[in-house]
Image (cartoon, rainbow, N blue to C red):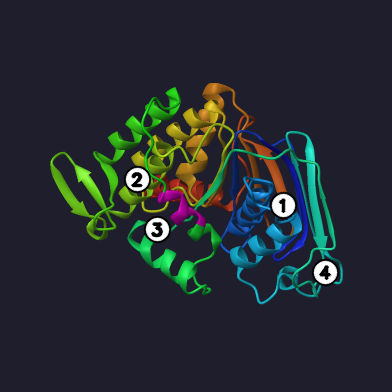
Amino acid sequence: MLNKVKIENFGPLANVEWKNLGKINLVIGKNDRGKSFLLKALYATMRTLEKYQRGDNQDSASEILVDKLYWTFQAGKIGDLVAKGSDAPLSCNVSLDGKTFCYSFGKDTTKHIPTLENHVDPRNSNSIFLPAKEVLSLHHIILKSRREGEMFGFDDTYLDLADALNLPKERGKNYTSFAKSRQQLERIIEGRVEYDTNSGRWFFMKGNQKFAIGVTAEGVKKIGILDTLLGNRFLTPNSIIFIDEPESALHPKAISDLLDIIVLLAEEGIQFFMASHSYFVVKKLFLIAQEKQMSVPVISKNESDWTHCDLKDGMPDNPIIDESIRLYQEEMGMALG
């Protein structure tokens, strides 16, 4: 799994260093602080490592990375990803199972990354990015606009997810914890999401009833996506899942249940990176960390710097927590007169 990350001058990420990463890792903070950007930067790096030397792919790591950065961030050229006003190059250095992958380039870079070192062994596992917005109702539109039109709009996090969802479900015995997780996911949404190959459409199945995906609740579709990726074996132990706003479109009980499933999958070997601004997410992970004495590293952006903590050691100082406490104190003040 990813052990540590150091990023400099990468868009809004002026200087991020995150060490001692765990099976579950959390990025919190206000909007527009670079939470999603950080997840996408790590995702582009992991997908590069996973495509490199896979099958008959003869592309160099540099060629794969350029393409992945271009379509993930959809900049005019990848040199535009260098932090505005910075004369220093963009750099990204990650450690995966103790082995290093790093690269660096300047603002004039277009199709070639001048500095890249890769000491990571080829990977058979897949990473995936689950965006805050669901994709099932947009599945065919994403594939058409990118595969046929090759147009900006849906970035590679959406395209990769749409491709992964296209894989047929595999028969046979699944990983034990995956099967258990799928049962719990289907229990949360009281049904399952399925793809009809004849019509090319997604449906929500609840008992004997069949609902078009367009009239299905957002939270159901979101959980259905994770269930599908477990069912078709795109995800395996040693996969890495990046989730932007796991709380999106879910009520608090469903958030709590989903995070319990994430812990189960993490114990099987999957590593998670989540970006959130939900008190429910932070509090639930804190309780899990306390109960299991499990490390849950947290990174948070304040006005100028990134701060670090571990939920195993306590709740972090953060505007999310501060606002929740303020509302509680306001409520108690009203109740007590």
- Residue 143 placement: quadrant: bottom left
| Three-letter residue code for mark 2 | Gly
Horizontal relation, residue 313 to residue 149: left or right: right
Residue 27 colored magenta? no
**Closest to the observer, 113 or 17:** 113
Residue at 39% over, 48% down: 331
- Residue 115 placement: quadrant: bottom right
Q: Earlier in the sequence, mark 4 or mark 1?
A: 4
Q: Of helix, strand and loop, which one carries label 4?
A: loop
| Three-letter residue code for mark 3 | Val
Tell me if residue 30 comes above or below residue 253 in the rendering: below
Viewer-nearest of discs 3 and 1: 3
- Distance between the Cα atoms at labels 4 and 1? 23 Å
According to the picture, the residue beneath numbered tag 2 turns out to be 224
Q: Earlier in the sequence, mark 3 or mark 2?
A: 3
| Three-letter residue code for mark 1 | Trp
Magenta stretch prevailing secondary structure: helix
Q: Check disc 2: other Cα within 10 Å, few if <14, some if 14-19, many if 20+.
A: many
- Distance between the Cα atoms at labels 3 and 1? 31 Å
**Closest to the observer, 187 or 71:** 71
Return the mark for residue 106: 4
- Distance between the Cα atoms at labels 3 and 2? 11 Å
The image shows residue 291 at horizontal and vertical percentages of: 52, 23
According to the picture, the residue beneath numbered tag 1 turns out to be 306
- Distance between the Cα atoms at labels 3 and 4? 34 Å
Q: Of helix, strand and loop, which one carries label 2?
A: helix
Viewer-nearest of discs 4 and 1: 4
**Closest to the observer, 159 or 200:** 200
Q: Which residues are magenta?
A: 160-166
Return the mark for residue 135: 3
